[in-house]
Image (spheres, rainbow, N blue to C red):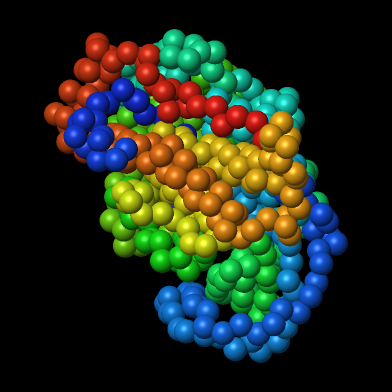
């Protein structure tokens, strides 16, 4: 579990990845080098256009009306716009900058994001971070986790295993503070490329790319807009992408400061299962422990003030052993967040983009945190889209094809690249999203007889061989 937003949720609820999915159900589920930098973008006044479809997004409605009269001129920019300065947005911007594509990040907050707890980075995430050139700085700051313990709430160990027992070993897993990951990504993205207080109001597309209207009234033109603004994305709403659905359970999470020692070994992630409640924790340093607890709750459950969250979290863990109770007690209430967990199953035959506008991260494929893959797949998105754009700008020299500037690329060719990216990412994330949801539902069952059967199976039958199948993925390099 990792995000401060309900849509991004706690990403590291470690679940048994070998639970079978019915074959018929599975079948249905599966059925540029830039000519100028962002600071030197060419400005010109476009001729008035008629007959555009204009999607206006407010906090409560989505309306469509033909045509739109320009109240004032706006800049025509040969850049990519990225909505959101979270993990998905900064990773996307970093990848584009790495291949020489000018971009600007639009962030609705007044400054860099400082909140959030931690994120679990699995092997596929580190492959993407290696491609971006920031993985080593994170490795130096956070310990390598190599063991998993699955326990009951009375501290009985059902199964303990090394990650290297999983297919595809060796594996790398580290818990990283969200703020540390954001700082690493932002080290690639110049401050001048990020515009704060830039909440998106509406999105328009035409034959030249995308036009964005901010809530401030400012208009921006770009060759492409990438919505990386979370599961409750304004860009996704402008594209008529359905909102995520509540999964039926809510999570508390935080980072405990424990200078006198951690309640678990420094190389171990421990998950504890109860009846309709589960928890987990892992070290992010010698004195810091990330933890979460997930519990069933109605979608309209009452708001809990920050000062009351520690007490509310503890009430779901009465008598629990194994260290989770102590971890929550060691976390100041203002460092505990509460999130409703959501997802959206990608519909067969439908996309998440239109024209020169596409999505990434939770905006494109929000998923429950039960496989710890939300942030990991967002990092994959950045590398894969940037590589496809780079191939468009730098075609094969062996075939005698000339290189292109971003301005010289036809919008139709760019749109084709976006559709290829979208199809590839839907194929990758669809089964993860569904599988994560099903596994979460299985582990949230509150009935004692079913929980006893689950525990028996884990203790006596379950093999961890396929525990990390979903993380055995290599997004490749940027070029």
Q: Residue at x 71, y 79 (%)?
A: 46
Answer above or below: position of 167 versus 17.
above
List x then y, in percent, for residue 73.
Answer: 72, 83
- In which quadrant will I find the C terminus? top right
Dividing the picture into quadrants, the one containing residue 80 is bottom right
The answer to whether 167 appears left or right of 275 in the picture is right
Answer above or below: position of 214 versus 342.
below
Answer above or below: position of 9 versus 149.
below
| Closer to the camera in the image, 362 or 476 | 476
Q: Residue at x 27, y 26 (%)?
A: 19
Q: Residue at x 70, y 87 (%)?
A: 72
List x then y, in percent, for residue 54.
Answer: 51, 78
Q: Is residue 64 visible?
A: yes
Q: Residue at x 56, y 84 (%)?
A: 50
Considering every residue shown, the one lying at the far front of the view is 400
List x then y, in percent, for residue 304.
Answer: 43, 59
| Closer to the camera in the image, 375 or 114 | 375
Q: Is residue 9 visible?
A: no
């Amino acid at each position: 579990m990792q995000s401060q937003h309900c849509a991004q949720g706690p990403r590291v609820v470690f679940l048994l990845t070998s639970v079978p999915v019915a074959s018929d159900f599975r079948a249905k589920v599966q059925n540029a080098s830039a000519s100028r930098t962002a600071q030197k973008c060419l400005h010109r006044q476009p001729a008035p256009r008629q007959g555009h479809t204009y999607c206006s997004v407010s906090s409560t409605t989505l309306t469509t009306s033909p045509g739109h009269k320009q109240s004032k001129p706006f800049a025509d920019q040969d850049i990519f716009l990225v909505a959101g300065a979270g993990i998905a947005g900064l990773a996307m911007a970093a990848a584009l900058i790495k291949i020489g594509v000018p971009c600007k990040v639009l962030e609705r907050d007044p400054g860099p994001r400082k909140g959030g707890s931690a994120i679990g980075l699995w092997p596929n995430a580190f492959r993407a971070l290696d491609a971006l050139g920031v993985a080593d700085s994170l490795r130096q700051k956070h310990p390598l986790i190599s063991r998993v313990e699955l326990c009951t709430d009375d501290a009985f160990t059902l199964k303990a295993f090394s990650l290297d027992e999983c297919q595809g070993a060796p594996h790398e897993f580290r818990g990283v503070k969200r703020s540390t990951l954001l700082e690493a990504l932002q080290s690639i993205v110049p401050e001048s490329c990020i515009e704060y207080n830039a909440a998106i109001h509406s999105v328009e597309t035409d034959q030249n790319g995308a036009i964005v209207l901010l809530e401030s009234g400012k208009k921006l033109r770009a060759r492409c807009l990438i919505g990386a603004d979370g599961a409750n994305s304004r860009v996704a709403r402008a594209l008529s992408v359905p909102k995520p659905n509540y999964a039926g359970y809510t999570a508390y999470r935080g980072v405990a400061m424990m200078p006198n020692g951690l309640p678990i070994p420094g190389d171990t992630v421990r998950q504890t299962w109860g009846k309709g409640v589960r928890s987990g924790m892992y070290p992010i340093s010698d004195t810091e422990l990330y933890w979460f607890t997930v519990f069933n709750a109605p979608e309209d459950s009452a708001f809990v003030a920050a000062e009351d969250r520690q007490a509310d979290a503890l009430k779901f863990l009465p008598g629990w052993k194994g260290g989770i109770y102590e971890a929550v007690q060691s976390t100041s209430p203002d460092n505990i967040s509460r999130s409703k967990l959501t997802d959206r199953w990608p519909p067969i035959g439908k996309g998440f983009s239109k024209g020169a506008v596409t999505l990434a991260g939770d905006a494109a494929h929000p998923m429950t945190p039960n496989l710890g893959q939300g942030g990991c797949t967002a990092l994959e998105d950045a590398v894969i889209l940037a590589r496809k754009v780079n191939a468009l700008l730098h075609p094969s020299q062996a075939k005698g094809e000339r290189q292109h500037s971003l301005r010289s690329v036809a919008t139709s060719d760019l749109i084709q690249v976006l559709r290829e990216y979208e199809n590839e990412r839907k194929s990758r994330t669809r089964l993860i999203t569904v599988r994560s949801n099903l596994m979460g539902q299985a582990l949230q069952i509150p009935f004692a007889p079913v929980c006893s059967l689950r525990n028996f199976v884990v203790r006596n039958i379950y093999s961890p061989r396929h525990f990390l199948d979903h993380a055995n993925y290599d997004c490749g390099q940027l070029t």
